[in-house]
Image: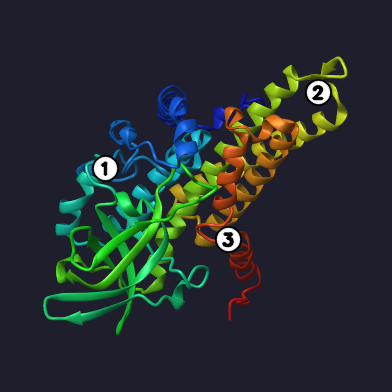
Amino acid sequence: MDDTINIETLFQNEELMIRDSVRQFVDHEFMPLITQAYEKACFPKELIGRIAELGILGLTLPETYGGSQAKAVTYGLVCQELERGDSGLRSFVSVQNSLVLFPIYTYGSDAQKEKWLKRLTTGKIIGCFGLTEPDSGSDPASMRTTAQKISGGWLLNGSKMWITNATIADIAIVWAKTEEGIRGFIVEKEFSGFSTQEIQYKLSLRASVTGELIFKNCFVPEENILPHATRGLADALACLTEARFGISWGAIGAAMACYDIALNYAKERKQFNKPIGSFQLIQTQLVDMWSEINKAQLLNLHIGRLKEKNQANFALISLVKMNGARTALEIARTARNILGANGISLEYHVIRHMNNLETVFTYEGTDAIHHLILGKFLTDIDAFT
């Protein structure tokens, strides 16, 4: 998408360099694989090493732990470029960064940081995040997974559902109810009583691994509890806030891809002896798409700069996630319509983005939930209770 309003002038050179390196990776290494990966419903695991080489796993962590100490806007741009390719690619990186590295770095002991962070940033091990359950989605406080204190550790029982990276993960950050409240645990795939199962027959996020985590008297040693996650559900939700920020940028990356495809198609596709882009209805749709993308980019950038100053609270992150997901889904649907019958072909990619965005619209907080979060923020009245 051409930068017709000079948004790039608002970014720093280093931010643009990292963005461009990720864009090149997506265009030249990921895109040739995505159609078959989506068709076959598999994540291109052969690219994990290359993703790690780009330095985007643990991007915002200190160099001590394998990171680059990059700031929020840099991470946002990375997510934008990844989801230009596919939501599944951005989800893989987002989970590793926001939902695995972040809680270990924020709530973990020094020993846990030393044991896990560098291996996660180099892609030698993969992680996942277990909060959502079969009967507990928008209301995570109603979770049924429990952790019972026993000699030397904890016994976990329950299950987590719709977990990205579930069956390829080496560790899982799992949240469970204890007598002292909700706590976070690092569950290793070799632990007895821990198993995973992949979810089949998805029509969205097909190029992403999604599964269930199952715990049947799973013993977790004491050293694997996150010692500084002592605020209960608030600590788990803080991880979601980190993930939602990246999603807001990623969704607009998908929207940009759909807009580019629709614009080029409208210029080339001829009906009634002229390009369909010459018709008023098509031009109106293209202008609306272009306008909404630019507005969303500027909102994301503004909240990103606030986040870098520790001035973006959870409500503002809900705002950009809600706006980004809704805007992107509407744009993808419009683009699919502009392409007519070709809009449902994977050859043109729009239907893939559209289907993916149906999930992006829902996960990490549904559109309705983000409205209620913002409603409470504006009125100071809690609509959840």
| Secondary structure beneath label 3 | loop
**In what quadrant of the picture does the C terminus appear?**
bottom right
Would you call the spot at circle 2 few (<14 residues within 10 Å), some (14-19), or many (20 or more)? many
Residue beneath disc 2 = 276
Q: Quadrant of residue 8?
A: top right
Q: Quadrant of residue 333?
A: top right
Tag on residue 121? 1
- Residue 248 shown left or right of residue 197 in the figure: right
Relative to the observer, which residue lies in front, 44 or 321?
44
Would you call the spot at circle 3 few (<14 residues within 10 Å), some (14-19), or many (20 or more)? some
Q: Residue furthest top?
A: 273
- 30 versus 249 height, above or below: above
- 278 versus 53 height, above or below: above
Q: Earlier in the sequence, mark 3 or mark 1?
A: 1
Residue beneath disc 3 = 366
| Secondary structure beneath label 2 | helix
Q: Residue 112: tell me if it is visible.
A: yes
Q: How is the image coloured?
A: rainbow
Q: Residue 5: tell me if it is visible.
A: no
Type of residue at label 1? Thr
Percent from the top left, x then y, of residue 262? 69, 28
Percent from the top left, x then y, of residue 113? 20, 54
- Residue 159 shown left or right of residue 114 in the figure: right
Q: Residue at x 62, y 74 (%)?
A: 380
Closer mark to the observer between disc 3 and disc 1: 3
